[in-house]
């Protein structure tokens, strides 16, 4: 039986803690859990240690952010011999067969070396709809025909997708060995996109597994998204994207310098 470690970063997680950790106990596949708490003030730590003693709790003296705290949990699980690392948000939980179905796809995949991330289908907190952000990711990857296959109930075991957020990531040890952990530059948001860029750089794939379902009780309104912030993060992750060649980076730098020079000298192109 493979050693599967859930890594959960908490910060004032009392609203979801009981559902989250109870769901791990009910998994058809035995799992371990490491929690890195980012300085909760609502009693999350005491609730976990009192009601879920099987969970290993690591207490941070300050809020480290999502990526850096996850890295601590990943390192701890790695030292304990983890075969798989399941990164899960605090506002999330699984069903009893969620992990089992992810493992089935992994075990039957013809080329395990290409698997970077396996992700289940994210359902919202009501249990009646897909997570609105998953809707967005699926629509963006329309060429997979997943929407059509969902409608006609002709689903494949998995679909390659360009991005899915890190609310539920199932990572083989090979991914950690090759790609590493999160970039600690990103405190919260952007770290998952930057990680997926490195997944692609190392010729690995992000695969969505329709038969495996989980819950992500996050915000379900795109109108609440701070798109200015996300645009800034997109620019930053693109700058760090290892798939962008040095020559292209140099060209962009030269273009920027030229534009600035023209602004200050008053030169304009004449057409």
Image: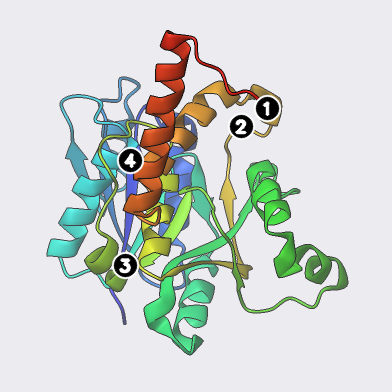
> Residue at the spot x=59%, y=62% of the render?
161
Q: Nearer the viewer, residue 91 or 235?
A: 235
Q: CA distance from mark 1 to mark 3?
A: 51 Å
Above or below: residue 219 compared with residue 7: above
Q: In whole angstroms, how far apart are the C-alphas of marks 4 and 1? A: 56 Å
> Of tags 3 and 4, which is closer to the observer?
3
**Percent position (x, y) of residue 152?**
87, 72
Q: Earlier in the sequence, mark 2 or mark 1?
A: 2
Q: How is the image coloured?
A: rainbow
Between tags 4 and 1, which lies in front? 1
Image coordinates for residue 78, horizontal then vertical, percent = 18, 63
Q: Which residue is mark 4?
A: 9
Q: Marks 1 and 3: which is nearer the front?
A: 1
From the top left corner, tell me how far across and down residue 145 is, in percent.
Answer: 76, 68
Which sits earlier in the primary sequence, circle 1 or circle 3?
Answer: 3
- Identify the residue under disc 3: 175
Q: Residue at x 52, y 30 (%)?
A: 230
Q: Position of residue 238 (x, y in %)?
A: 43, 42
Q: Label 2, secondary structure: give it.
A: loop
Tell me the CA gap for discs 2 and 3. 29 Å
Q: Which mark, residue 271?
A: 1
Please name the residue shown 41% across and 32% down the image.
Answer: 13
Q: Secondary structure at mark 1?
A: loop
Give the label on residue 219, or none.
Answer: 2
Determine the CA span between mark 2 and mark 1.
49 Å
- In the rendered image, the quadrant that contains the C terminus is top right
* Corner quadrant of residue 179: bottom left
Neighbor class of circle 2 (other Cα within 10 Å; few <14, some 14-19, many 20+) is few
């Amino acid at each position: 039986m493979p050693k599967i470690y859930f890594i959960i970063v908490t910060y004032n997680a009392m609203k979801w803690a009981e559902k989250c950790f109870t769901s791990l106990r009910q998994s058809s596949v035995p799992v371990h859990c490491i929690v890195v708490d980012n300085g909760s003030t609502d009693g999350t730590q005491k609730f976990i240690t009192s009601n879920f003693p099987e969970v290993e709790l690591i207490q941070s003296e300050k809020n480290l952010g999502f990526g850096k705290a996850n890295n601590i949990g990943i390192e701890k699980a790695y030292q304990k011999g983890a075969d798989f690392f399941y990164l899960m948000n605090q506002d999330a939980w699984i069903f009893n067969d969620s992990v089992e179905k992810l493992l089935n796809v992994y075990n039957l995949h013809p080329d395990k070396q290409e698997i970077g991330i396996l992700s289940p289908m994210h359902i919202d907190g009501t249990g009646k709809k897909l997570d609105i952000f998953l809707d967005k990711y699926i629509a963006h990857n329309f060429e997979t025909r997943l929407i059509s296959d969902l409608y006609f109930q002709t689903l494949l075991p998995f679909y390659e997708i360009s991005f899915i957020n890190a609310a539920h990531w199932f990572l083989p040890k090979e991914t950690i060995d090759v790609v590493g952990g999160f970039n600690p530059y990103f405190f919260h948001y952007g770290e998952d996109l930057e990680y997926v860029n490195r997944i692609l750089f190392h010729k690995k794939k992000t695969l969505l597994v329709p038969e495996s379902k989980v819950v992500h009780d996050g915000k379900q309104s795109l109108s609440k998204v701070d798109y200015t912030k996300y645009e800034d993060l997109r620019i930053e992750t693109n700058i760090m994207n290892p798939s962008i060649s040095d020559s292209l980076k140099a060209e962009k730098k030269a273009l920027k310098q030229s534009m600035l020079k023209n602004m200050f000298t008053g030169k304009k192109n004449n057409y």
